[in-house]
């Protein structure tokens, strides 16, 4: 920068810093968000399609919004907000991760025209927040509380709805009861989801998946002698250990120094005594089954086999905890001081062949707090996706139990909320009216996309739904998209139910995300540290304009052009649709 | 000039300095450039002023995304390079440290002052005359500001009053959420105030726990500490005495390397048992002292855990030394550096310690009943939001709110907000300027004009017509209505009488004016910039 030649060039910020501001920047952010939503929108609903994501090492086939969002490695700073809300929906509710992204993007799309028309974003934000609040209140009002008797049936339907949109939807008659059974066993405070394990055994058929009311885990590595053990116990006593039962030196830094060679044998004997003493204590306490987090060596295995006990070493911590919970046993780090209190028991133990794996099963336990679902299926990807689906369903049932209220799915609740918002908007004077109406229109994306994905004419269905909701106030409030047959139906009647907390959270989160993106009026990207020459091209043309030239570079520029590549990480290939281009 | 120097390397300034330096001087070369840079910075931040201010999205060098309208954060993350703009950044930093609020006022006002003196320089005024004028104007402002104080808050233990005062501060950062945040902040501050004496709040004693997921309505305030992890053992609820160990709960090992020497078989047999027994004894003695909750600053060995479980104690691991110190203060315990039974006065007490689930995260909540003994010295605000950027911005807003209450406890004087103070000051300074003979009169007038930017920006940011509002305000103030300010919700003609619901802290405003005038004068006094070649050849 030469001194005082023409316009003064002032470098205010560090070289390579990128700034962009004003309306174009906001529009570009909105475009980026829409592009992200575009990528996941076809996965929504029972007829949604799956995505195959290949990250260079692993292939993932999924229909779960959060999984896809995480794998996409979105680079655009504003679009990252959508990843955030998808993740938070996953953490908070576990399901509805696609719809939250869709909703947020659609809200932005609907208000884009206002931004272009020059409405101040703060005005938009104020009424968006108001609308989101009203929407959440409406859902709360609409929610149908659980009734004692029908509680279980309701849970079944919620689980069914969650599974409906997944790969294993055709087997929901099998999985839904499984999930409900597993979750309802948990204690009322529902604190620990780790108590429900999902084990995957590739091979076999999906329908041979089953639920173990208790604990099941794959047979651990075992030494000789294991095959002589009894593999089935009725009413066994169980001892859980965190002790290594193997012949080895007691402590790393111990050293034995003997003066008399005769003593040598006594030292060897002593070592044997140490381990035998431990083994004896395990046997003496009356246990039939000994499990340990740490290895159980060949000596111990043989010893237990001789005494008619069953043992397993190197058991996974999670499984140990679950066995503890199920049987009432307490994990012991020492073999000393074992008493009746720390020994657990269950009704039945057996080692069983499942597929080509052997499983240890603990059933008929004292406490019903744990359950294990064993998933079977053809390919690894299939089982992985089934696992994710089960996780979603488990979370949904858990949240339904917690919130004790449900709403009808299939876009019905969105339509009803949209109707309420429209009515409410007419009471507002000024620009707020329009903003609230666009918010209402944005909500319609859910039924629209559901119909689109199922191959029906979305416009026809939406019109029918709007009419139904508007004309038959009370009677029409649960009408949504009829996925099975096309057209519309009362989804409450047909049992498409979702926990109300799912909708509440997604409306609140989507509204929040939309507001954050609207509230940004300037983007400044500092050059990455530790990477010299990371953005060499950004330096050019950074002379005049007072360092605040308002130009955009790199990701921002591309985002403006609307190409998908701008939002994804470098080197991402993207193919979509039947043509793949 | 630079060119000729380059040819004759032995002469002039260029000859004295190392090759590659940059050098600018004079009004055109240095002063105006500095002004330009400061203006640039002020332009970035001024659109974030006030409740309707917009957010900035800053991606810092670590690729972290920050969405905020908090000026101190923006200038910090911008990585400003220009030396003059850096002055403003430093002023903002000082303001953040001193009052934690009104940082935007500091930067924007300095920018505005500099912008206006650009015209003065073009008019032909000398820098020293401008400096003199600004100085005089500031002295007058300093005298006038205390006379504008509308109320003086004595009772800082009144929760409703605290909510009222921190609401506008929070609204400036999180407009629309202040009714949720303000009660949380006020409650948290109230809880940490010591009983008796003058109320005071140390900002460090209000902790913030951020948990992603849910929404802001689920945020809450807890009297006590929150540790962002679950317990080690299986016990999830406890109430009673607390023993805090700064060391790990495990068998003590010697620092010096040593080997255990065993002479015969009996030694070998008893070696392991003795260690186990020792641990049993220690844990038992801790349990016998009445401990219900055991907190460890280091690792808890599996053997120790075994006995802790057996004696029915809740065990929590806290790895951060800071958190450990706070937990000591929250439970009134003193940390032990050696494993062993604590004495009664070394032990603390916790009303209830629970593991609670927020989303998928598990937290350990140490709640204290507010009436017990000294009360609790730490309180925690749990913030919930769906996106990390919102969460971080909420945290900054809460920080500002706490800082505001802390400042309020020291100085309870309050000024009317909404630009009313600035417009009143502007009119008085203008009148004062007219009474001054000499060329500094122009500078004083510019100073007065610069103050108008606050109401103008407030109006601009809320999408209203700034010129109309400014005119209306000036008319109102000229008629003696000294409390009329901008109505950001745009009712009537955009102005309204500022009521008790919108008050600014005198201390914060006073310090903001002082710092920005200081920064302005420093920038103005520079007439020559010499930059040596940056060390290190890595960057271009």
Image (cartoon, helix red, strand yellow):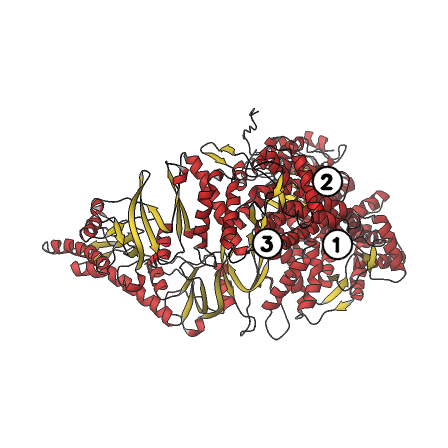
Q: Give residue A184's quadrant in the image.
A: bottom left
Tell me the CA gap for discs 3 and 1. 62 Å
Which residue is at the front of the view, B109 or B224? Answer: B224
Q: Residue at x 74, y 49 (%)?
A: A423
Residue denoted by label 3: A144
Answer few, some or many: residues within 10 Å of disc 2's Cα (few below 14, many 20 plus, some between 14 and 19). few
Residue denoted by label 1: B517
> In the image, are marks 2 and 1 on the same chain?
no
Q: Is residue A308 above or below residue A175?
A: below
Q: Give residue A556's quadrant in the image.
A: top right
Quarter of the rendering occupied by the C terminus of chain B: top right
Q: Position of residue A43 (x, y in %)?
A: 56, 36
Q: Which mark is residue A22?
A: 2
Q: Position of residue A159 (x, y in %)?
A: 50, 47
Which residue is at the front of the view, B478 or B279? Answer: B279
> In the image, are marks 2 and 3 on the same chain?
yes
Subunit bearing disc 1:
B
């Amino acid at each position: 920068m030469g001194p005082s030649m023409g316009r003064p060039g002032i470098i205010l910020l560090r070289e390579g810093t990128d700034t962009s501001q004003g309306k174009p920047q906001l529009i570009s952010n909105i475009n980026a968000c829409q592009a992200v939503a575009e990528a996941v929108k076809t996965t929504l609903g029972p007829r949604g399609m799956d995505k195959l994501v290949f990250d260079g090492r692993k292939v993932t086939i999924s229909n779960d919004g959060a999984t896809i969002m995480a794998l996409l490695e979105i680079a655009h700073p504003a679009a990252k907000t959508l990843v955030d809300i998808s993740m938070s929906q996953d953490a908070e509710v576990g399901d509805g991760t696609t719809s939250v992204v869709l909703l947020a993007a659609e809200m932005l799309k609907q208000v884009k025209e206002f931004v272009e028309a020059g409405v101040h974003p703060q005005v938009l934000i104020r009424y968006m927040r108001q609308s989101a609040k009203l929407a959440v209140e409406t859902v709360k009002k609409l929610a149908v509380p659980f009734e004692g008797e029908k509680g279980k049936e309701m849970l079944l339907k919620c689980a069914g709805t969650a599974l409906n949109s997944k790969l294993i939807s055709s087997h929901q008659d099998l999985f839904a009861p499984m999930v409900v059974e597993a979750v309802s066993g948990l204690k009322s405070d529902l604190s620990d989801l780790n108590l429900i394990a999902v084990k995957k055994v590739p091979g076999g058929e999906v329908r041979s998946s089953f639920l173990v009311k208790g604990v099941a885990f794959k047979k651990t590595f075992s030494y000789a002698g294991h095959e002589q053990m009894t593999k089935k116990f009725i009413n066994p006593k169980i001892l859980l250990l965190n002790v290594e039962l193997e012949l080895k030196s007691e402590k790393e830094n111990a050293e034995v120094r003997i003066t008399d060679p005769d003593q040598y044998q006594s030292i060897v004997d002593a070592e044997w005594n140490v381990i035998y003493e431990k083994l004896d204590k395990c046997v003496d306490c009356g246990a039939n089954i000994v499990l340990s987090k740490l290895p159980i060596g060949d000596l111990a295995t043989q010893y237990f086999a001789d005494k008619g006990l069953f043992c397993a070493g190197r058991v996974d911590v999670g499984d140990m905890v679950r066995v503890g919970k199920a049987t009432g046993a307490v994990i012991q780090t020492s073999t000393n001081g074992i008493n009746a209190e720390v020994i657990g028991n269950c009704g039945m133990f057996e080692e069983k062949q499942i597929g080509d794996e052997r499983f240890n099963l603990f059933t008929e336990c004292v406490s019903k707090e744990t359950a294990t679902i064993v998933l079977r299926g053809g390919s690894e990807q299939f089982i992985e996706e089934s696992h994710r689906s089960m996780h979603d369903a488990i979370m949904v049932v858990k949240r339904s139990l917690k919130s004790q209220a449900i709403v009808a799915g299939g876009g019905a609740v969105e339509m009803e909320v949209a109707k309420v918002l429209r009515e409410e908007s007419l009471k507002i004077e000024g620009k707020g009216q329009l903003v609230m109406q666009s918010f209402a229109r944005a909500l319609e994306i859910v039924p629209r996309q559901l119909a689109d994905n199922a191959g029906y004419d979305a416009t026809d269905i939406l019109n029918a739904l709007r009419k139904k909701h508007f004309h038959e106030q009370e009677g029409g409030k649960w009408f949504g998209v009829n996925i099975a047959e096309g057209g519309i139906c009362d989804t409450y009647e047909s049992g498409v139910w979702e926990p109300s907390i799912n909708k509440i959270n997604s409306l609140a989160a989507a509204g929040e995300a939309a507001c954050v993106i609207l509230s940004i009026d300037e983007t400044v990207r500092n050059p990455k540290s530790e990477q010299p020459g990371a953005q060499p091209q950004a330096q050019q043309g950074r002379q005049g304009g007072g360092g605040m030239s308002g130009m955009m570079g790199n990701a921002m520029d591309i985002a403006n052009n609307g190409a998908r590549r701008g939002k994804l990480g470098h080197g991402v290939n993207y193919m979509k649709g039947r043509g793949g281009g | 000039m630079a060119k000729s120097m380059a040819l004759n390397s032995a002469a002039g300034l260029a000859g004295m300095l190392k090759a590659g330096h940059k050098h600018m001087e004079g009004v055109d070369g240095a002063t105006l450039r500095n002004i330009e840079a400061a203006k640039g910075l002020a332009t970035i931040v001024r659109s974030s002023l006030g409740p309707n201010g917009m957010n900035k999205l800053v991606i810092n060098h670590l690729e972290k995304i920050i969405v905020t309208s908090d000026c101190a954060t923006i200038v910090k993350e911008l990585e400003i390079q220009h030396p003059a703009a850096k002055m403003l950044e430093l002023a903002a930093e000082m303001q953040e440290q001193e009052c934690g609020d009104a940082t935007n006022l500091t930067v924007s006002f300095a920018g505005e002052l500099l912008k206006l003196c650009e015209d003065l320089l073009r008019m032909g005024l000398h820098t020293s005359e401008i400096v003199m004028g600004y100085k005089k104007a500031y002295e007058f402002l300093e005298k006038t500001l205390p006379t504008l104080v509308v109320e003086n808050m004595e009772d800082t233990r009144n929760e409703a009053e605290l909510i009222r005062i921190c609401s506008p501060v929070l609204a400036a950062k999180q407009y629309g959420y202040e009714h949720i945040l303000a009660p949380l902040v006020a409650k948290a501050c109230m809880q940490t105030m010591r009983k008796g004496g003058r109320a005071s709040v140390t900002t460090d004693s209000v902790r913030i726990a951020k948990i992603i997921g849910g929404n802001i309505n689920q945020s809450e305030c807890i009297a006590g500490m929150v540790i962002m992890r679950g317990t080690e053992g299986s016990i999830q609820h406890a109430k009673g005495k607390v023993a805090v160990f700064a060391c790990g709960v495990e068998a003590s090992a010697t620092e010096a390397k040593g080997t255990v020497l065993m002479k015969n078989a009996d030694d070998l047999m008893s070696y392991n048992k003795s260690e186990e027994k020792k641990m049993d004894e220690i844990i038992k003695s801790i349990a016998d002292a009445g401990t219900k909750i055991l907190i460890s600053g280091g690792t808890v060995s599996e053997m120790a855990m075994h006995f802790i479980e057996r004696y029915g104690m809740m065990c929590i691991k806290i790895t951060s030394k800071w958190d450990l110190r706070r937990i000591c203060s929250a439970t009134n315990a003193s940390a032990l550096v050696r494993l062993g039974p604590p004495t009664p006065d070394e032990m603390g007490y916790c009303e209830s310690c629970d593991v609670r689930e927020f989303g998928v995260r598990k937290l350990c909540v140490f709640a204290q009943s507010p009436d017990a003994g000294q009360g609790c010295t730490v309180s925690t605000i749990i913030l919930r939001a769906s996106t990390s950027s919102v969460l971080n911005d909420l945290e900054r807003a809460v920080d500002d709110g706490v800082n505001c209450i802390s400042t309020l406890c020291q100085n309870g004087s309050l000024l009317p907000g909404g630009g009313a103070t600035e417009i009143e000051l502007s009119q008085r300074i203008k009148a004062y300027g007219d009474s001054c003979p000499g060329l500094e009169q122009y500078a004083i007038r510019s100073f007065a004009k610069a103050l108008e930017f606050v109401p103008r920006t407030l109006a601009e940011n809320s999408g209203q017509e700034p010129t109309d509002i400014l005119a209306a305000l000036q008319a109102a103030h000229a008629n003696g209505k000294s409390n009329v300010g901008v109505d950001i919700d745009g009712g009537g003609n955009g102005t309204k009488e500022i009521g008790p619901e919108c008050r600014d802290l005198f201390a914060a405003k006073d310090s903001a004016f002082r710092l920005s005038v200081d920064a302005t004068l420093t920038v103005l006094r520079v007439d020559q910039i010499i930059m040596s070649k940056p060390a290190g050849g890595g960057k271009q």
